[in-house]
Image: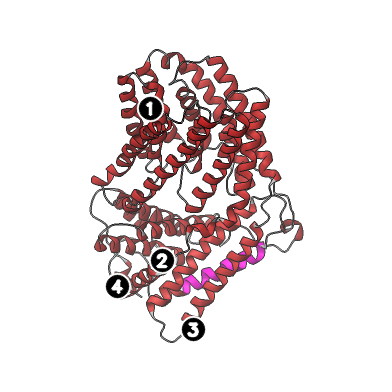
Amino acid sequence: MSSAPPTSDPTLTARPVRRLPLTGVLRLGRPSDIWFKPALSVVVSVAPPNLTLLALGRLDLAMYTMAGSLCALYAHNRPYAARARVLAWVVLGMLGGLALSLVAASLTSAAVVLVAVGALMAAVQKALCDATRVGPPGNVVLTFISSASLFVPQTLGQVPGHLVLAAAAAAWAWLVGMAPGLLRPHGPERRATAQALDTAAAYAATRGTSDGHARTRAAAAAAVQAAWQALSVTGARPGLRRALERLTVRAEVALAAPADTDPERLRTWARQLRGTGPLPSAGETAAATEELLGVDAENAAPHRPWWSRLGPLAPVAVRTALGCALAGYASLALGIGRPYWALVTAASLYQANLALTWSRSVQRVVGNLVGVLVFAVIAPLAHSGGLALVLCCAALNFGAEALIGRNYWLGTICVTPMALLITEFAGRQAESDLITERAVDTVLGALVGFAAAVAVTNRRTGDRVEHALTAVDRARERAARLLAEAGPAPAALESARRSLAAALVELRATVDAASGEWWQRALPQERVVLTEQSAHRTLAATVRRLGLDAPVASTGRTTEDVRP
């Protein structure tokens, strides 16, 4: 069900201005299950190239190897077959942005031109990362690399060598990202399935009626959808993939019949999946086999290309370009020599809607201001020698990735001093100037960037809600037609059920994004609630028709042992 209660009171549904959140913005969450993987990966990726440069006496080139090394931050939740492709595209994107920045820096030193180039690149990087759904850290790292490179003195003759350094470090980062697959080749798929089971168990524990059940169900549905997406791109052998798919089916059944599901059994399966032992068995039945045939049919169908998602992202891209340009120019007007700090601050703010952008703005300012204080404390140690500088950067890289999953501001406490230390690879600079300029650029970038987000309204969010509602209605009608038949093909019915589940996940994400925008027409909240309720009932009916809704018994028996 929807997390928004139905209402017919126009004062509750037609208010054009949304209230920005003031509480909970800095609240810490639980760390990711694999927080240590990106943290260790980035250290292993960054340290060897930097230590090599230190041994060669060319630590001044470390910013180029760092550009390649930071590619190791991406795609940790992807199955390894998909991770190889995603990391390759990230590397190419990083090299493309770096090449453009270095060439621009070699052709002109006019800061006004360079800020414009950086703002346009930031907008393109934001749109492409969101459209391809590359995942965290998204466009921020790419924008940091390209924007900082714009203000490094270059000649055209130096560009190829600097790109070679970045490419070599990026190749090493690709190997680091793929290396865990040698020990646990199907870990990402297992974790995604375990997350689906855990969140489904949390929903089943509510029995579908207690407080917070709607929010819990939405989270579980999203996790189940993420598990199916991971399994659709896995390179696992058919038998292993089928076993994970059957477990994901059990998570879906819990969404349709929470009162008949034993949450503890789902949690037990999740724990077993996160280990290194054999896969737990959810059993095998004709109904489950037919459902998986439906999964195969859905996966074989043509999917929507990523570039078709660029159109709805136009307002966010415009916000990014305008906010980054204005932030950079404001920094120049104050006489600060590093306008890319303000530019990157603005680029890091823009989220799916204005409310989330506001939250990120507060988190960014708090984290950066605390981070400059951390830099003031550790700077004397880092300046004691080249080795100390390299090790401090590695430690801060680890801290950033270890903490950022708890809350963005906590991670930026380490990101900020790391970025300041990177500027000192080419030579020591006055600490007081770095601290003052970074603090001013942070506040300036956040204020100007958020003002641009307010100025560029996203009025099309209401249209996207209407489209999402229509998609759910069509998917529900298709499933209902099949249910009305005397003997519908199980594979067709399962394909219709999966399509309806995916449409519901998209609807909830679209409504959540639209709910955080300012100055838009009223959302059809009552229609959203009624549509979700009707779709959930249809989903439950398809589960019963397929014979998948038998309870998961707490005695350890699977649903196949207790068929009604």
Q: Can residue 24 be seen in this snapshot?
A: no
Q: Residues within 10 Å of mark 2 (few under 14, many from 20)?
A: many
Look at the numbered disc 4 and give the secondary structure of its residue: loop
- Look at the image and tell me in which quarter the N terminus lies: bottom right
The answer to whether the residue labelled 3 contacts the one labelled 4, judged by CB atoms less than 8 Å apart, is no
Q: Label 4 is placed on what type of residue?
A: Thr
- Label whose residue precedes the other's in the sequence (3 or 4): 4
Q: Label 1 is placed on what type of residue?
A: Ala
User: Dividing the picture into quarters, in which one does residue 548 lie?
Assistant: bottom left
User: Dividing the picture into quarters, in which one does residue 201 lie?
Assistant: bottom left
- Look at the image and tell me in which quarter the C terminus lies: bottom left
Q: Which mark is residue 394?
A: 1
In reply to whether residue 333 is colored magenta, the answer given is no
Q: Residues within 10 Å of mark 4 (few under 14, many from 20)?
A: some
Q: Mark 4 sits on what residue?
A: 285
Q: Label 2 is placed on what type of residue?
A: Val
Residues at marks 4 and 1, CA–CA distance in whole angstroms: 51 Å
Q: Label 3 is placed on what type of residue?
A: Ala
Q: Mark 2 sits on what residue?
A: 253
- Label whose residue precedes the other's in the sequence (1 or 3): 1
Q: Which mark is residue 484?
A: 3
